[in-house]
Image: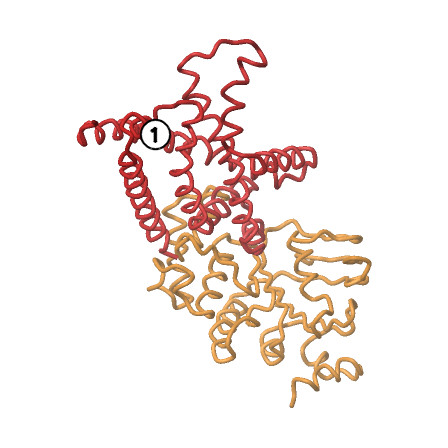
Chain colours: A red, B orange
Amino acid sequence: MYLFSTMISELSFGLITSIEIFLLTILFSMPLGLAVALGRMSKIRPIQWIMKAYISIMRGTPLMLQLIVIFFAPYYVFGIGLSSDYRMIAVILAFSINYAAYFAEIYRGGFESIPKGQTEAAQVLGYSKFQTFYMIRLPQMFKIVLPSITNELITLVKDTSLSFVIAIPEMFTVAKQIAAADSSIMALLVAGVFYYIFNIIVAWFMEYVEKRMDYY
Amino acid sequence: MSLFEMKNIKKSFDGKEVLKDISFSVEKGQVLAIIGPSGSGKSTILRIATGLETKDAGDILFDGTFGLVFQDFNLFPHHSVMKNITNAPVKVQKRDKKEVNNVAKDLLKKMGLEDKENNYPSQLSGGEKQRVSIARALAMNPDMLFFDEPTSALDPEITGEVLKVIQDLAKEHMTMVIVTHEMNFAKNVADHIIFMDDGYIVEEGTPEEVFGSDNQRMKEFLGKFQD
């Protein structure tokens, strides 16, 4: 029999790993998504095509499959042994490039809904293209896409559980192990509560950010 | 010597010719009003003059600086009134921030908006927004100003406050080209009027000459404003 307190402490350790995956994915995927969005909107056709294909593949295939492929590719393709450090790198890599595709499309939608007059006003005032981008379009885009970003982040919290397929000791992996050892569903229920609280905090934080951005 | 000159400008959109050989010039200190029915090409002239559209043929002779006031303001919603006015002078023209701030404050005072500097555009009425956008254009110290139907997006009862600002600028001999539907305003404030129809300049001259013209199309157009 598992002590309830042991279970909570083991799940909490798992939760820390889940949070780590969550934060690192945001850190890498949000800027990468911006780069992909800019490529997707580029006037240079080949860049546009490459980004379109990238987004299409990332969104069109299961994240779980992408995780497995990225984790095992070095071994099957190059015959490189899999170190335990690589497990976490593979997870962050897979999540980041997958979420970047979604963020890219969200950003693109945001950029496209900024009235054309904004760019024209900036042009007439002599703003360079780069200045127009980071002073006028980028800040306006972020406000427009905040609700969609919130959606993605909430999905990401739950998606971190997919890391169990390559045995990362995040919360879901831990909960499954405890449930199997304990022949009880309790650990999974507790993990569910933890995920739910995690997401309430994310939603609350994003609501705060939206309020802060509501000055105009 | 004219400050600004357009020579034989032509422009088509998707095979439809909207400007057919447009030539005119603007003297320093002159106020030119461009009038004419919708779709006659008035706004396209301004968009070409300000570089927002390319011309298909012709020449533009001008080596000064200009400002453009849009019909729908195009203020930056995420910037305060003050920042809307000061950002380009500071970041584009690299002028001293303090100097620009003082200029902006003087302009806001002139526009009757001295208490609005910390507001955001969404908190302003249409007339206030348009006055801020005129201040934004003036803060760049332009040699001339273009206005693209500056009162068309405003409720009729508040067009007066914007027209008054433009009238004051005319008294200070600001060189201006104004595309407008306000016939009385054009008559009172402009030194020179161009009447456009179907991509051509049909009539041009002093307000007296243009409004007293015997040209049939001109008469028809003015008739619509006199009922």
The N terminus of chain B - image quarter: bottom right
Q: Is residue B103 left or right of residue A181?
A: right
Instruction: Read off the residue under disc 1.
Output: A176
Image quadrant where residue A162 sits: top left
Classify mark 1: residues with Cα within 10 Å, few (<14), some (14-19) or many (20+). some
Which image quarter holds the C terminus of chain B? bottom right
Residue B110 spot, x, y in % from top left:
41, 65
Residue plotted at (82% across, 58% down): B15
Q: Is residue B51 visible?
A: yes
In this rendering, is residue B217 above or below A28?
below
Q: Residue type at mark 1?
A: Lys
**Which residue is pictured at 55% across the width and 45% down the height?**
A108
Q: Nearer the viewer, residue A186 or B132?
A: A186
Q: Chain of mark 1?
A: A
- The location of residue A120, given as percent across then percent down, is 58, 53
Residue A81 point in image, percent of width and height = 49, 9
The residue sitting at 41% across, 52% down in the picture is: B83
> SS of the residue at dot 1?
helix
Using the image as rendered, state which of residue B73 and residue B93 is in the foreground: B73
Return the residue found at the far bottom: B227
Left/right placement of residue A94 relative to residue B5 reads: left
Q: Residue A84 at what x, y percent from top left? A: 40, 14
- Above or below, B150 relative to A173: below
Q: Is residue B9 visible?
A: no
Q: Nearer the viewer, residue B182 or B24?
A: B182
Q: Residue at x 52, y 22 (%)?
A: A70
**Based on the displayed image, in which of its 4 quarters is residue B147 positioned?**
bottom right
In the displayed structure, does residue B132 sit left or right of residue A170? Answer: right
